[in-house]
Image (tube, rainbow, N blue to C red):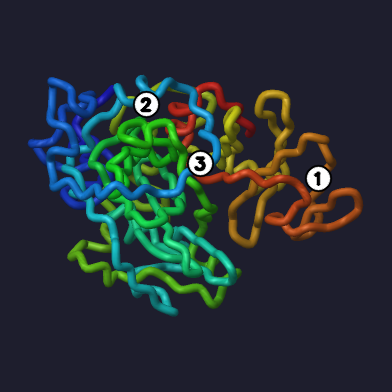
């Protein structure tokens, strides 16, 4: 059921003020829960702040990603997260350093990206207060995003525009808006559900959810986001709990908002590594994958294989239409007698990312689940 967010945080032992941190806050002027933009029961997000759209648009994919719902159904399920548009401020002018902030422990989570030899890390304890970083990587404009309520860190090409936090949620998931067209994009779906770009999907890139010790061990030359964000925030205080060790919202069976659909195949907050194509979706239990190293599943009739990367404590998913045998050996994987690194199998790798099970199953109730 949908209940008081403040009461939830109190019962899970996370008793700090919500305003200005995370996906939820306290703003009585925002849309009623369950109200879609322009409905008679509330004010649309676009009217709560100055319209910053200028007609430019982010680059979009050649085909739309798979959805388990009609666009109209998703739009009807937009709810207020408790803050106005841009009430959670995106970081538009990030600064990076060669050494980690004092507040970052080796086992704390970071979100890593790498392209053309340039590696960057974004600490979870900073992004929980902002959710979006508009940045560049190897000269390309990108956006790195994080939703604490669904445990998802994802990256998008942004072209000439920036993304901001709409203040709304779908299936508990951060709903971004682009400052070019003011289209709304649920982060996990990467597909617009309102605005001029409705039904189009963004171009994505891999974001690795790992720990600082794992990331810096593999990428010692990485740059790391600093607390010099231009905003005054209580960095180091997470309004939802903590990941090191996991506590509060991140371990509780409760959710702050009703999922689009329930699914009892796993603990609601169990972490899965999910992938979706233009035809379907598939999720692998992350803990099981890291233990067993190779898991297999299907999207429609196409076999897929997931392999663990123990150096980064993550995994990758590949289409495997010929059902080639993939065997774990030491820190590599053998196919037809040849060893490959986990991120370089001679198969078509699909984009995948970590997510809490309740959120994945809510968006993709038809998804396969491998554990």
Disc 2 and disc 3: Cα gap in Å? 16 Å
Whichever of labels 2 and 1 marks the residue nearer the N terminus, that label is 2
> Helix, strand, or loop for circle 1?
loop
Q: Which residue is drawn at 63% across and 41% down?
A: 288
Q: Is residue 33 above or below residue 104?
A: above
Q: Is residue 263 above or below residue 341?
A: above
* Residue 341 screen position, x and y as percent: 74, 59
Q: Left or right: where does residue 268 sit relative to residue 75?
A: right
Judging depth in this view, the residue of 314 and 174 nearest the camera is: 174
Q: In which quarter of the image is the C terminus?
A: top right
Residue 259 has which mark?
A: 2
Disc 3 and disc 1: Cα gap in Å? 23 Å
Q: Mark 3 points at which residue?
A: 271
* Residue 222 screen position, x and y as percent: 50, 73
Q: Determine which quarter of the picture holds residue 280.
A: top right
Q: Mark 1 points at which residue?
A: 326
Q: Which residue is drawn at 59% across and 60% down?
A: 312
Residue count near mark 3 (Cα–Cα under 10 Å), binned few <14, some 14–19, many ≥20: many
């Amino acid at each position: 059921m949908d209940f008081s967010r403040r009461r939830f945080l109190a019962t899970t032992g996370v008793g700090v003020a919500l305003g200005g941190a995370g996906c939820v806050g306290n703003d009585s002027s925002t849309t009623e829960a369950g109200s879609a933009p322009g409905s008679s029961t509330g004010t649309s997000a676009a009217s709560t702040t100055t319209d910053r759209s200028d007609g430019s648009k982010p680059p979009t994919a050649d085909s739309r990603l798979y959805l388990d719902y009609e666009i109209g159904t998703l739009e009807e399920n937009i709810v207020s997260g408790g803050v106005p548009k841009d009430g959670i401020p995106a970081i538009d002018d990030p600064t990076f350093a060669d050494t980690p902030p004092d507040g970052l422990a080796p086992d704390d989570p970071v979100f890593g990206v790498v392209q053309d030899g340039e590696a960057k890390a974004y600490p979870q304890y900073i992004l929980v207060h902002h959710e979006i970083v508009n940045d560049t990587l190897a000269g390309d404009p990108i956006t790195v995003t994080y939703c604490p309520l669904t445990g998802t860190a994802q990256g998008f090409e942004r072209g000439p525009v920036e993304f901001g936090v709409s203040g709304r949620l779908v299936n508990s998931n951060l709903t971004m808006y682009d400052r070019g067209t003011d289209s709304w994009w649920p982060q996990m779906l990467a597909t617009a559900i309102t605005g001029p770009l409705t039904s189009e999907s963004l171009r994505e890139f891999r974001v690795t959810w790992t720990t600082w010790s794992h990331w810096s061990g593999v990428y010692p030359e990485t740059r790391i986001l600093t607390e010099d964000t231009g905003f005054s925030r209580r960095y180091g205080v997470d309004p939802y709990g903590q990941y090191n060790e996991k506590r509060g919202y991140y371990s509780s069976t409760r959710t702050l908002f009703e999922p689009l659909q329930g699914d009892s195949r796993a603990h609601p907050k169990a972490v899965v590594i999910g992938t979706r194509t233009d035809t379907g979706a598939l999720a692998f239990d992350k803990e099981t994958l890291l233990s067993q190293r190779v898991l297999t599943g299907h999207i429609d009739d196409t076999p897929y294989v997931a392999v663990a990367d123990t150096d980064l404590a993550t995994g990758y998913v590949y289409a495997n239409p010929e059902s080639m045998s993939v065997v774990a050996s030491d820190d590599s994987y053998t196919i037809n007698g040849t060893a490959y690194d986990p991120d370089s199998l001679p198969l078509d790798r699909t984009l995948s990312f970590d997510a809490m099970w309740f959120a994945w199953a809510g968006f993709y109730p038809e998804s396969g689940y491998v554990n």
